[in-house]
Image: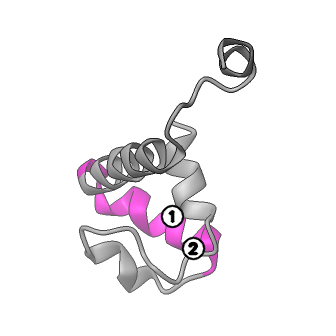
Amino acid sequence: MLCRLSDYPVLNESHFSELEYTEAENYWQQMPIKYRVELCQKAGICVFAARHDYIPQDDSGYIFESLVSN
């Protein structure tokens, strides 16, 4: 198990994913609308989705990945 942790240091993938999504959603909520709109445009989704405090569900993953990589 220790050897595998050196390659990929995650014991519980489900818990890790939940933490990652929560962090991305918090980041989205704190972003100014201007930057949310830019992300929506780059993702090819309606800019009105930027008004909501949750990451747009019709995103192909672009917005989420952009938030996680920050």
Callout 2: SS: helix
Residue for badge 1 = 38
Residue 67: give x, y in percent of width and height. 49, 48
User: Which residues are drawn in magenta?
Assistant: 30-44
Number of residues whose C-alpha sits closer than 10 Å to that of mark 2, classed few (under 14), some (14–19) or many (20 or more): few
Residue 64 vs residue 15: left or right?
right
CB within 8 Å, label 1 to label 2: yes
Quadrant of the drawing holding the N terminus: top right
Q: Quadrant of residue 20?
A: top left
Residue at left offset 52%, top offset 63%: 39
The image shows residue 13 at horizontal and vertical percentages of 53, 45
Amino acid of disc 2: Gln
Q: Name the residue furthest front.
A: 1
Vertical relation: 45 (above or below) 69? below
Q: Amino acid at mark 1?
A: Glu
Q: Say which element carries label 1.
A: helix
* Main secondary structure type of the part rendered in magenta: helix
